[in-house]
Image (cartoon, helix red, strand yellow):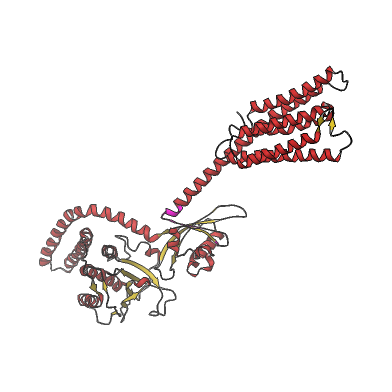
Amino acid sequence: MSAVAGSLRPGNRETIWRTLQTFNVTRIAIAVVLLAYLSINARQGFWMVEGFLYRQICGVYLALAVGLGVVTVWRRQRLLLQLTAGVLADIVFISTLYVAAGGARSGLAILYLFPLAGSAVLAPMVLALFFTALAALAMLLESAYQLLNSTAESTISQAGLYGAAFFSAVYVLNRLAGRLIRQEQLAMQHHQGLQTQQAINQLVIADMGDGVLVMGTDTTIFIVNPAAERMLGLSSAAARGRLVDIAWLAPVADAYLAWAGNSAAALAFVMLKPAEERMTHLRLRFASTGATGNERIVVFLQDVGEIENRAQELKLASMGRLTASIAHEVRNPLSAISHANSLIAEDAVDPVQLRLVNIINDNVSRLNRMIEDILRLSRKAQPGNEPVRLAALVPQMVEEFRDAQALRPGLIHVGMLDDCKVLFDPLHLREVIVNLLSNALRYASGQDASIRLFMVTGSAQRRELHVQDDGAAITPQVRAHLFEPFYTTSSKGTGLGLYVARELCMNNGAMLDYEYRSDAWNQALAQASGRFVITLATPDA
């Protein structure tokens, strides 16, 4: 294998031409040094010895070297042709000086090493050995000529030693050059592979649904993918600061410091409230690159709300497959049990029997409500397209709920409602409000205005309907499962009310969530109070 044959590839072409240019510059430097040396040591007869003109030879060689250098710079074509022309010119010039100076005793044989080394690096092995053979042949012919003229100082063995040394050097240099070129090709392949892998990683990180945040040990942010920017409420400018300097990201910074003190606790759950954004519940996982002196912390973020939505969709799909069998296999026997219990109640006079009848009736009613909730999910009627006015509709719904539950007038306080239009089916909205008010009634203190229903205008002119009670706020642990079907903390609940309410909101383009917000209503609360927030869709949205 030749050094140059394996190097004329797109990745190595620039290196080879740059090496040839360096070779030409070196040739010019040697020609200048020789001309200067001969000028300094000039004496009578030195410039002409037996018909050889040193000054003219060096001048022609310098002009030729400059010409070859210019050609290499301006025409990057036919590399082997340019190299061959230059090496042949070197051998002819050095042989001329070698013969004129008296052969091996002049010490000029070392000049052959320059062109031969260049050919060993840039030319194929066969061509480099051919040039070496020419140089060795020139030295042998000069020694033979001196021997024929009976010059005692001339020996063929000395020229032979020079030739053998040149052949060995050319062979070793050619092999080393080939190995270096192969190593360069391998390095370039690795570089291209790393660039491709980096591009793939950037594409995957940018498109992945989970957030990825890369920061230093001092919380300086280096990389934030679009999902993390959305979850953390960061802009492109803020994504180049420090985590501890951003007020609403204090929980994330605290979670990182806790992890730094105890790296075994890699998972953390935080609640964030970015400026003019809704509260987000995030799951954090920390990992370290482990690079000493240049350590980077990688934070993986997941929106717990989105995870809950996906889990609920899966549960809804499973529930849909069970709806038909529940309606046919449970509802009919349940009606029979209820009818039989009514017949028993007509003849029951014993208090114990009456108590058992009431227990059966209560449980039948509870099962019937559960079946109604499940069937209501399966219907999923499309909402009407006509917008409704909340200011006229909501007070009417609250009044109907108050009458149905026989509540005193001051228990539920309806705040100021904007006279705006929203896209929500009135029947669906009534069911959502009834569910939320029933849940609030279960945990409220029962005092006047212990349940509040009011409207808030959020960012981007979003309309939010809030339902809040003065009971204890829901803990984050319960909040994580709040909208799951059949999950309840009450012995009297079915665990479907809030789930049905959220599904109806989503069916009308709205969103129901439980958020922690601070207000001036309950001064006794040291932290933000919880409330259900319905983000409504408007006709102009």
Q: Nearer the viewer, residue 75 or 381?
A: 75
Q: Describe residue 467's horizontal placement relative to residue 191 as left or right.
A: left
Say whether residue 306 is magenta. Answer: no
How far across and down, in percent of the image, does residue 148 sit? Answer: 83, 17
- Was residue 218 drawn as part of the magenta stretch in this picture? yes
Query: Going 34% across and 75% down the picture, which residue do you hit?
Result: 456
Vertical comparison of 500 with 177: above or below: below
Q: Position of residue 451 (x, y in %)?
A: 31, 77
> In this image, 221 relative to 380: left or right?
right
Q: Quadrant of the N terminus?
A: top right
**Residue 160 at least partly seen:** no
Given residues 498 and 368, the one toward you in this image is 498
The quadrant in which the C terminus is found is bottom left
Q: Report x, y in % for residue 425.
A: 22, 68
Which portion, as a residue range, is magenta?
A: 205-220
Quarter occupied by residue 274 = bottom left
| Residue shown at the point (46%, 65%) measured from the top left | 235
**Closest to the observer, 430 or 341:** 430
Locate residue 57: give its quadrant.
Answer: top right
